[in-house]
Each structure stands twice: as C-alpha cells, then as structure tokens.
Image: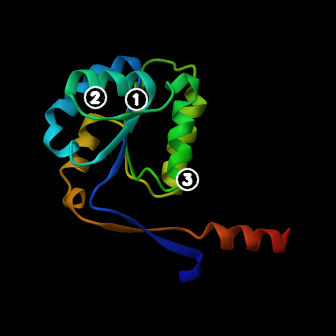
C-alpha cells in the first residue's frame, strides 16, 4: 500500500497561484492587500489580468501566466503537475457562466489529484492563509503515478 503513494513536501515558502473571475477580482485584490505581510514572503503567480491587477494595486511581485480564457488556468494546472505550485487561491464566480469553465474544472480536478490546497472563496482562503502550515513544511501523500501507469500497462 505504501508504494501506491509517494510523499511530496510543500516547503515553508509556498508557491501560491492567485486567480479570480472578473466579478471576483476586486475581492481577491482586497484579500491580497489584507494579507500583504504574509504573501510578500511567498512566491506568487497568477493568470494574466488578475496577476497584473494584483501587482499594480498591492505592490506584490507576481509572475503572470496567460489570461484564464487564453489558457492561463491550464498553465497553472501544468505547473501543479510539474510540482511548481503548491497552493491555489481561486476566487470563482458561481453565479456567472464562464466561457472557459472546462479549464476551471480541469484546474480544480488536477489540484485534487495532486492534493494541492485550493481555496475557492474568501472564507476558505482566510482559513488557509492563517493556518499554522503557512509557516512550516507540510508533507502530503500523492498517488505514485509511475507505479499506477506501470500497473495499468500490465493489466490492459
């Protein structure tokens, strides 16, 4: 059973993705301003417009990927798979249809597969950023994908 999973470690300095749908961008910017003293000690990235707006309005350094509808959500998902991102804050808008909804669902799914903490609203983000784990390493178990692929190849 133990070989079915491997341990990944999220370091003390977190690699945090910040994403927001258009109607939620002001809330995320305000949240970043409120949590500036914590966020400035971590590596930040985000999707295009959101990253630019956060940087402009908070002074935080944030690496920008493409805008969500132009593949930014998928870029963030790929970075999760690569082990580059270990914490996601995504202020999503549940009341407005999004043209890139499949990309958003894919990002949520890959966060779940890789056991990555993901806040989808301010309350969850507040709980996560105030957690004791923000200041220490965190070990978590992730499916041993190599073994999983090997087992599937043998059985198919």
Disc number at residue 28?
A: 2
Report the residue marked by disc 3: 81
Instruction: Give the CA distance from mark 3 to mark 1.
Output: 21 Å
Q: Residue at x 81, y 69 (%)?
A: 153
Q: Quadrant of residue 102?
A: top right
Question: Crowding at label 2, few (<14), some or many (≥20) Cα neighbours within 10 Å?
Answer: many
Query: Relative to 146, is 46 on the left or the right?
Result: left
Label count reads 3
Residue at x 44% of width, y 30% of height: 47
Q: Which numbered disc covers residue 92?
A: 1
Is mark 3 in CB contact (under 8 Å) with mark 1? no
In the image: residue 76, left or right of residue 133: right
Distance from the alpha carbon under mark 1 to that under mark 2: 10 Å
Q: Is residue 109 visible?
A: no
For the question of whether residue 51 can be seen, the reply is yes
Q: Secondary structure at mark 3?
A: helix
* Residue closest to the far right: 156
Q: Nearer the viewer, residue 38 or 28?
A: 38
């Amino acid at each position: 059973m133990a070989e079915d999973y491997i341990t990944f470690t999220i370091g003390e300095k977190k690699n945090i993705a910040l994403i927001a749908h258009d109607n939620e961008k002001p809330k995320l910017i305000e949240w970043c301003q409120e949590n500036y003293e914590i966020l400035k000690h971590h590596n930040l990235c985000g999707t295009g417009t959101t990253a630019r707006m956060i940087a402009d309005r908070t002074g935080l350094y944030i690496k920008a990927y493409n805008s969500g509808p132009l593949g930014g959500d998928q870029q963030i998902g790929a970075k999760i798979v690569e082990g580059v991102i270990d914490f996601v804050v995504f202020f999503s808008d549940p009341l407005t249809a999004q043209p890139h909804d499949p990309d958003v669902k894919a990002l949520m799914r890959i966060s779940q597969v890789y056991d990555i903490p993901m806040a989808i609203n301010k309350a969850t983000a507040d709980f996560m950023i105030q957690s004791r784990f923000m200041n220490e390493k965190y070990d978590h178990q992730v499916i041993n994908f190599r073994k999983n692929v090997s087992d599937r190849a043998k059985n198919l």
